[in-house]
Amino acid sequence: MKPDVRHAIDFVTEATDLIETAALAAFEARGEFRLALSGGNTPKPVFEALAQRPLDWSRVIITFGDERCVPPDDERSNYLMACRTLLDAVPIPPENVLRMKGEIDPATAAAEYEAALHERSPEGAFRHDLILLGMGPDGHTASLFPGTPALEERSRLVVENYVPQQKMNRITFTYPLIDAARHVCFLVNSAGKDAILEEVFSGTSDYPCAAVNPTDGRLTWLLGA
C-alpha cells in the first residue's frame, strides 16, 4: 500500500485532529474506538492535546504498541508516560486501559497481553481502529528493532523481544497485529531523519518501520519539522 505522507505545519494539532477524527468515525461505525499508543518523546504533546478534546472516553480502548520490561512506575515506562500526559487527565474506565506488564517475565507478559486482546474481541481477531507508531534513528518501530527475532514472527500478535542494542527485553506488537489495523499512523519529527525517511519511502528499505503494510487499512506518515 502506498502511504499517505503528510508534512505537518502544526504537528500537534494535525496529529490530534487525526486521532479525534478516527475516534468519531469508530464510535459511529462500531461503538468503540481501539487506539494503540506509542512511546518516545514525539507523542507527548499530542497526548496532552488529545486530553483536552471532548471524546467519550468510556468508549475508548487503549493499548500499547510496546513496553520496556520495567515496572509501571519506572521513568522508562511507556505506560507511565501515557498516564502523565493523557490517561490521568481523562475519565477513561481503568478496565479500558490494557497495560503491558513490564515488571513480570517477558514471555508471560506477552502471552497475557495477547490473551487480553482476544478476550476483548469475541467477534474474531482483535483489530485496532488506529495504531500510533514512531520511528527510531535506527529505523525501528514499536520494539521491532533491526536484527531481532520479533521481526520474523508471523503468527503471534504480541511477543517478548530481546534488544541487544539496549541490552534489555521488551514486549512488542508484531507485524500481524499492526498490519491488521484499520489505520496505522507514524508520528515522526523528521529532524535528523531525512536520509532514513527517503530510504523508507523508496520502497526498497529493510528498516523495520518500512515493513509495516496494513492488509486492509490505511497507512499515514505525519512528519513534523
Image: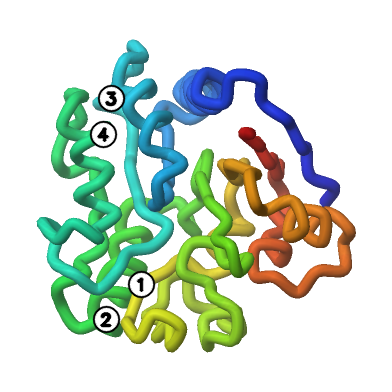
Q: Residue 221 vs residue 165: left or right?
A: right
Residue 80 coordinates in the image, percent (x, y): 20, 49
Residue beneath the point at 69% across and 40% down: 220
Q: Nearer the viewer, residue 224 or 185?
A: 224
Which amino acid is tagged 3? Trp
Residue 88 lies, in percent from the top left, at: 15, 32
Q: Residues under labels 4 and 1: Cα distance? A: 21 Å
Q: Report if the CB atoms under discs 2 and 3 are less than 8 Å apart.
A: no
Name which of mark 2 and mark 3 comes first in the sequence.
Answer: 3
Q: Name the side, left or right, on which 104 lies relative to 205.
A: left
Residue situated furthest top in the rendering: 54
Residue type, label 2: Pro
Count of numbered labels shown in the rendering: 4
Q: Residues within 10 Å of mark 1 (few under 14, many from 20)?
A: many
Which sits earlier in the primary sequence, circle 4 or circle 1?
4
- Using the rendered view, name the quadrant where residue 119 is placed: bottom left
Residue ID for mark 3: 57
Residue 87 in sight in this render: yes
Picture disc at residue 171? 1
Residue at x-position 37% and y-position 61%: 118
Q: Are marks 2 and 1 in contact (CB under 8 Å)?
A: yes
Q: Which badge, 4 or 3, comes first in the chain's sequence?
A: 3
C-beta proximity under 8 Å, tags 4 and 1: no
